[in-house]
Amino acid sequence: QVQLVESGGGLVQAGGSLRLSCAASGRTLSNYAMGWFRQAPGKEREFVAAINRSGSRTAYADSVKGRFTISRDNAKNTVYLQMNRLKPEETDVYYCAARPAYSGNYYLTGYDYWGQGTQVTVSS
């Protein structure tokens, strides 16, 4: 239905910022609510942020609230995650994911489409 490709990861010093991008193809981005997740080796994927189809609602994990901002630009078929004041423990692979309309309004579930991930490394 939709293909997702993350970019923008890299190495950043603690306290620094990165902006991740998730480019979609195959379907119009506005058909999907979107989310960002992160995962360390051997760990479960962790929810980071979500945005609804219109962009009128967002949700964040408590650990990133006030530091991260999810946004979308449907004209560019792209979702973004602005990450500020990064911490070393946030060194993870970050994934974007798409929620079809039928998934409903519970933002922690229903992500049927996933990107390959982009590595974020935060140095001390």
Image (cartoon, helix red, strand yellow):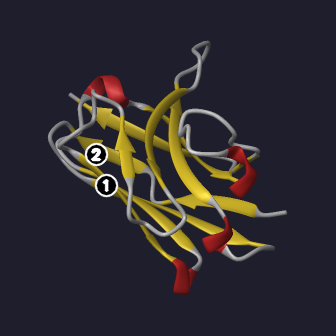
User: Hey, which residue is sitting farthest top in the picture?
Assistant: 42
Provide residue 75's location: percent of width, then percent of height: 54, 87
Provide residue 91's location: percent of width, then percent of height: 39, 30
Judged from the image, the secondary structure of the residue bearing numbered disc 2 is strand
| As drawn, 28 above or below 9 | below
Q: Going 56% across and 37% down the picture, which residue do you hit?
A: 106
Q: Going 35% across and 30% down the picture, which residue do you hit?
A: 90
Rendered-image quadrant of the N terminus? bottom right
Q: Going 77% across and 74% down the picture, which residue do you hit?
A: 27
| As drawn, 68 above or below 27 | above
Q: Relative to residue 92, is residue 34 drawn left or right?
A: right
Q: CA distance from mark 1 to mark 2?
A: 7 Å
Disc 1 versus disc 2: nearer the observer = 1
User: Hey, which residue is sitting farthest bottom in the picture?
Assistant: 75
Residue situated in front as seen by the camera: 33 or 92: 33
Provide residue 80's location: percent of width, then percent of height: 43, 62
Q: Quadrant of residue 23?
A: bottom right
Q: Going 28% across and 28% down the picture, which residue do you hit?
A: 62
Judged from the image, the secondary structure of the residue bearing numbered disc 1 is strand
Disc 1 and disc 2 in contact, CB within 8 angstroms? yes
Q: Residues within 10 Å of mark 2 (few under 14, many from 20)?
A: some
Q: Residues within 10 Å of mark 1 (few under 14, many from 20)?
A: some
Residue identified by numbered label 1: 18
Q: Quadrant of residue 61?
A: top left
Label located before the other in sequence (1 or 2):
2
Q: Amino acid at mark 2?
A: Val
Count of numbered marks:
2
Residue identified by numbered label 2: 12
Residue situated in front as seen by the camera: 123 or 77: 77
Q: Amino acid at mark 1?
A: Leu
